[in-house]
Image (cartoon, grey):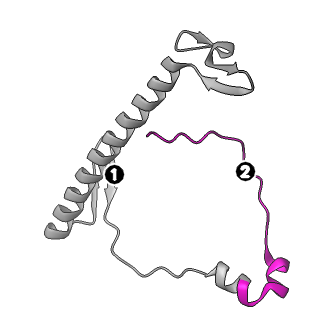
């Protein structure tokens, strides 16, 4: 399999027992993450402006050929303090805990 011109075996090499990511791949992932953050920030800012405009004009829905935007009014959300419940009721907490499988993934942190 080729990724960015590299075979999978070229992505991670070992320096003794230490796995090392190919420098080009590392830079590419870091750049993707930076671009993604910039795009997300721009999207969030635009959505905030749309929200403000919809509130000012009393609009609850905009439907175009490309997208549909619905205004969602502020509400209160009910949450359950599972950490406190576990601390105070350990004896019954375990009876209600449900385990769910989570697939493998990688987590990338840009420095």
Q: Quadrant of the C terminus?
A: top left
x and y percentages locating residue 72 in the rendered image: 35, 68
- Image position of 25 with respect to 109: above or below: above
Mark number for residue 3?
Answer: none
| SS majority, magenta | loop
Q: Residues within 10 Å of mark 1 (few under 14, many from 20)?
A: few
- Image position of 20 with respect to 96: above or below: above
State the residue in front, 12 or 103.
12
The residue that mark 2 highlights is: 102
- Image position of 22 with respect to 30: above or below: above
Q: Residue at x 34, y 76 (%)?
A: 74
Residue 49 within the magenta-colored segment of the rendering: no
In this picture, residue 55 sits left or right of residue 85: left
Q: Residue at x 33, y 73 (%)?
A: 73
State the residue in front, 94 or 73.
94
Query: Visible in this render: residue 1?
Result: no
Q: Residue at x 24, y 59 (%)?
A: 48
Q: Secondary structure at mark 1?
A: strand
Marks 2 and 1 sit apart, C-alpha to C-alpha, by: 32 Å
In this picture, residue 101 sits left or right of residue 76: right
Residue furthest to the front in view is: 16
Query: Visible in this render: residue 97?
Result: yes
């Amino acid at each position: 399999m080729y990724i960015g011109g590299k075979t999978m075996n070229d992505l991670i090499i070992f320096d003794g027992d230490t796995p090392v990511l190919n420098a080009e791949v590392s830079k590419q992932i870091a750049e993707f993450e930076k671009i993604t953050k910039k795009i997300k920030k721009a999207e969030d800012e635009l959505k905030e402006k749309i929200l403000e405009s919809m509130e000012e004009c009393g609009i609850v829905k905009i439907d175009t050929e490309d997208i549909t935007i619905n205004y969602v009014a502020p509400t209160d959300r009910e949450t359950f303090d599972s950490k406190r419940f576990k601390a105070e009721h350990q004896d019954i907490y375990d009876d209600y805990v449900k385990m769910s499988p989570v697939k493998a993934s990688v987590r990338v942190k840009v420095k």
